[in-house]
Amino acid sequence: MRLGLRLFFAFFLIAGLSSFLLLRVVLTEVKPSVREVMEDIMVDTANLLAELALDDLAALPPGGDLRASRFAERVQDYARRPIDAQIWGLRKQSLDFRIYVTDARGRVLLDTGPGAAVGADYSRWRDVALTLRGDYGARSSRATYGDDRSTVLYVAAPVRRGQQVLGVVTVAKPVATIQPFIDRAERRILIAGLALLALSLAVGVAVTWWMVASVRRLRRYAQQVQAGRREPPPPVPGELGELALAMDAMRGRLDGREHIEHTVRALTHELKSPLAALRGAGELLQEELAPADRQRFAGQVVAQSERLTELVERLLELSKLELQQGPGHPALLRLDQAVEQALARLADRLAQQDLTPHWTARAAPEVRADPELLALALANLLGNALDFAPAGSVLELAVRVEGTQAVFELRDQGPGVPEAARPQLGQRFFSTARPGSLRKGSGLGLAIVRRVAELHGGRLAFEPAEPGLRVRLFLPLA
């Protein structure tokens, strides 16, 4: 399972269970809480009515009927009173209290309920029995067996004169009358809970998406590093950002170590040939030789020494370029003039090899480049072409504009480069044999050109030509 799905399912499980348990607890508490509030109000009502009934009950003779009393008239007036009230959006059109009064023995003296039970013995009902005993009297009963919605709550209060209990006033109210309030509260809580769950899931999706997107950016960065491409670490906040910086630092250290190891191996390989030639020539020069042979071997010593010197100088130059982050002293330059200056510096070699520069296209684009670095790149490009161009041939030069880039194009008419080897051109210590000999160059010249192009935001490209090789140097226009 993918990381994003794992995170989302984990968040969904936690948020879902938490919301379910919270909703269950809240919904379970709604009905009892409302009933407790209703019972509290009924306690106040019962005690108020007990005080109002005191005078009439005290004046009632033994075996008398309370229905003709002033208190009974007021209670009946209450029962007949019209009502139409809007209570927070719910309409109330009936008065729901049932009131009955018993004497000190539990006999019903007054009852406003349907099927009035005047004269009945209620002394065994909990509300009456507990109140006559001096305790808090209350009970709940179902009007219909097994139907919780038919439950009626009864709360009683004693009618006292001094310490004497004259009777009991009981207030009854069907729970069904407050059920709409309970249903509305549960419905609102459920809707709010579902909305909270949806919001939590939306937040979970957002957090999961952000986390997965950050991890994917790190994965993409790691894949680019693995493929050998140099990319800056992704700007990820928090601990993932610190991880990206740590990965970049680790990559830098590993690149540096690998770069040094590769350079040392390649340099060791490159040094073997000139050192072997120097040793062989030195050993022969220790013997008695004819003047011509001595001169020839001495010339080999000088040539190999110059080769070593060139190798070291180019390697130092390339190492210095690899440490730079951009051109050191950029200035506006015309690319065609820079090429002309590079050709002028190589005029002697051109004449020695009887090579003729020929412009096939010429423009005057301006580039922002470091003059020394651009001259170094052009010198290495032209020098490489001179190494491979046959004597008496033509060097084709072109400067043009392609989109937002200036292009310098150079084609020699040498043997060219095999297709399999072309992608490796520009890598340090990779080169092909010079025409007419088995000697190879160090490959550092084209590596220098490639690095100069990268520092200026450009690139170096190679294309086959018949005959020869076409090299194209791209630089951004100023």
Image (cartoon, rainbow, N blue to C red):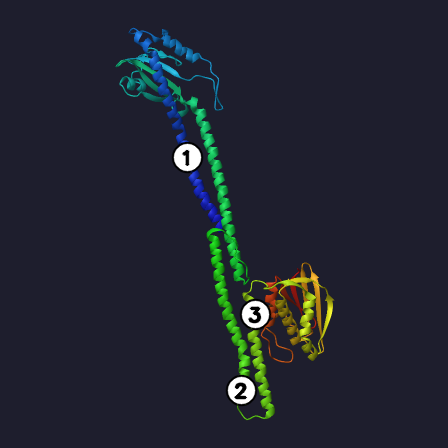
Q: Quick one: label 1, few (<14), some, or many (20+) residues within 10 Å?
A: few
In percent of width and height, residue 438 lies at 61, 80
Q: Residue at x 54, y 69 (%)?
A: 319
Front one among 5 and 302: 302
The amino acid marked with disc number 3 is: Leu
Q: Are marks 3 and 1 in contact (CB under 8 Å)?
A: no
Dividing the picture into quadrants, the one containing residue 354 is bottom right
Q: Secondary structure at mark 3?
A: helix
Front one among 226 and 345: 345
Q: Which residue is mark 2?
A: 282
From the viewer's perspective, is 62 left or right of 192? left
Dividing the picture into quadrants, the one containing residue 324 is bottom right
Give the number of the mark in front: 2 or 1. Answer: 2
Q: Quick one: label 3, few (<14), some, or many (20+) residues within 10 Å?
A: some
Q: Which mark is residue 318?
A: 3
Q: Is residue 237 above or below residue 37?
A: below
Q: Secondary structure at mark 1?
A: helix
The amino acid marked with disc number 2 is: Gly
Q: Which mark is residue 24?
A: 1
Q: Secondary structure at mark 2?
A: helix
The amino acid marked with disc number 1 is: Arg
Q: CA distance from mark 2 to mark 1?
A: 97 Å
Q: Quick one: label 2, few (<14), some, or many (20+) residues within 10 Å?
A: some
